Amino acid sequence: MKRTQYLSLALAVALLAGYGLAAVRISKPDVGRSYRAYFIDRTQVGWHTSAYEVPEDQGIDFSRTGMPMWIRAVGGLSEPETLGTWTDARKGNGAVIRYRAPFEGQVCVQLLASPSPDNVGGVSYLQMGTGSRAFTTPMKAPTWHSFNILLEQPTAVVRIYPGVTERMSAQDARMVGLLLLRLIVTPGVCD
């Protein structure tokens, strides 16, 4: 072989190796959890949405755009509306709220929620660590639910699983279950 043929062959091998490496990097991108949840898995609401200042004992107001500074990420939710934010089964199995700092010991969890029409009277679940509590939403109006949970290990994650999900409408493909209005998690026992 001539020298130019060796160079052409070496260039072709280098190009193929480069394309192969690019294909691997594209199929398995090395990105952060929040980036993956929003752009790839489509399970998180908002990417770097504005965070707002509010004391933790006032909780999350799901009608506001963005999340409090002390929330790391949320998933399984649609975009905020006037009253709150719907859980959306297309974006995950229930709502996931991940706090920046973990809770430990006894916590009080207070949830203000309203069911979708098919979920009225249905059983939904709130989970924090290994503690899980069932609750029913007996009427369409927003209802407060309070839970005392003793955490066996520190956790920073609250999960809310609606009992039933339904398509919002023929024009709206969201699979809604619960309209979340407010979530408050504080150390100690509920009053």
Image: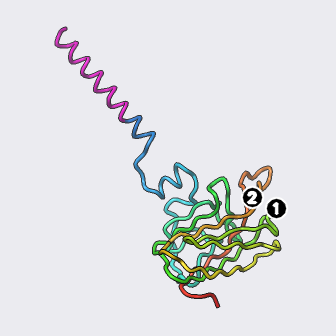
For disc 1, the marked residue is 118
Camera-nearest residue between 29 and 135: 135
Question: Marks 2 and 1: CB-CB under 8 Å?
Answer: yes
Q: Is residue 2 magenta?
A: yes
- Horizontal side of residue 85 vs 140, given as left or right: left
Query: Which mark is on residue 165?
Result: 2
Q: Residues within 10 Å of mark 1 (few under 14, many from 20)?
A: some
Q: Residue furthest bottom?
A: 191
Camera-nearest residue between 172 and 96: 96
Q: Provide the residue span drawn in magenta.
A: 1-21
In the image, is residue 177 above or below residue 15?
below
- Horizontal side of residue 44 vs 176, given as left or right: left
In the image, is residue 35 above or below residue 61?
above
- Horizontal side of residue 135 vs 74, given as left or right: right
Asked which secondary structure carries label 2, the reply is loop
What amino acid is at disc 1? Asp
